[in-house]
Image (tube, helix red, strand yellow):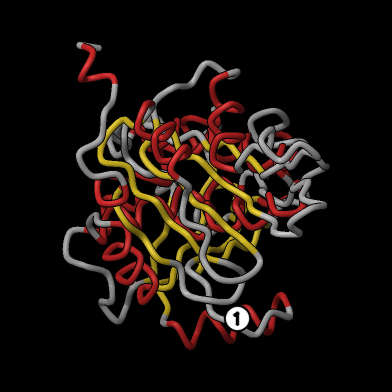
Amino acid sequence: MKALIVDDERGLLPEGCLSLLENAAQAALACEGVTGVSAGLRVVTDEEIQTLNRTMRGVDSATDVLSFPSVNYPKGVTLGRKPALVKKCYDPEIGAYYLGDVALNIGRVLEQATQYGHGADREAAYLTVHAMLHLCGYDHMNEEDKAVMRAMEKKVMRALGLFKNGERFMDTKDCIAAAIGALDLSYSPYSNFRVGACLVSEDGQCFVGANFENASYGATICAERCAVSNAIVHGVKRFTKVFIACDRGYAWPCGICRQVLNEFKACDMEVWVGNKTDEWKMMKLSSLLPQSFGPEELGK
């Protein structure tokens, strides 16, 4: 019995990808601690997944992957905690409990693999893990649930040998969404210029921050330094990327923030800036702070 039954009759998957997807599904189930279950995955195109999304969810847009669970999970419960939930989903044809169906958009797999700088097989494996966890009852509708699901994704990807320290694990779109979401946390009654930030650590954790102003002006704190403070109180001090959002235009870091980010960089940090509507831009911190002075000059 296979953990994942893949339908790729048109041969859309990259060569050698099929076995990796099956391993990804098996690893997700193993990390969840369940056996004797299976799921189906169909490889589709951009247009096909948009039709599915519109028909099944009322969302008329394409996405990278869709999951359709057979099990109705109570809030906060996943299959590993209550395996009896799957008892009503036994499929005698495959001889296993059937968790549900997955649609994998090959167009987005290829596009996102290029965007994130890794292979299409790795991207397809991650999306399969993500989908399988949805079938097991995980979700990301709020920040608490999202943190739990992200931690489980990391665990599975490590089990597959596909997650490394320093690798950006959250999708760029997730980090952008987190930075934009942090705009609502801004306290900016004087300038009315809101800024939100999402800081990514070398092990894939994300910490948000927002600018907060003060009547004395000089006591104002930028979103980037707020995010750094948030991370430090959680014991994290090495970062690879920062995403900075504002309501309009582009909010590149000020000089003080560039120096603070330079203090805690784990590599040549990527600095992303943007807003809700315009295309996001990226520059390396070394370009924004050339000939910098940092811990290395003090032998640290």
Q: Residue furthest top?
A: 299
Residue drawn at point x = 32 percent, y = 36 percent: 163
Residue drawn at the location 69% of the way across and 79% of the way down: 59
Judge left or right: residue 54 versus residue 269. right
Percent position of residue 191, x then y:
73, 57
Quadrant assignment, res 119 = bottom left
Q: How many marks?
A: 1
Name the foreground residue: 290 vs 8. Answer: 290
Look at the image and tell me in which quarter the C terminus lies: top left
Q: Is residue 54 above or below residue 259?
A: below
Q: Quadrant of residue 198?
A: top right
Estimate the x, y position of residue 104 in percent, counting from the top left.
Answer: 44, 68
Q: Residue 127, position in %: x, y?
A: 44, 56
Left or right, 65 with respect to 145, comes to left
- The answer to whether any part of residue 181 appears in the image is yes
From this view, report whether residue 112 is shown above or below residue 185. Answer: below
The quarter of the picture where residue 230 lies is: top right
Would you name the residue on which mark 1 appears?
A: 52
Circle 1: is it few (<14), some (14-19), or many (20+) Cα within 10 Å? Answer: some
Compared to 156, does 86 lie above or below? below
Amino acid type, residue under disc 1 in the picture: Leu
Q: What secondary structure is marked by label 1?
A: helix
Q: Is residue 95 visible?
A: no
Pick the front one: 111 or 22: 111
- Horizontally, is 27 left or right of 179 in the view? left
Q: Position of residue 29 (x, y in %)?
A: 50, 37
Residue drawn at (34%, 56%), measured in percent from left and top?
A: 123
- At a point 64% along the width and 37% down the height, the residue shown is 221
| Image: 37 above or below 11 | above
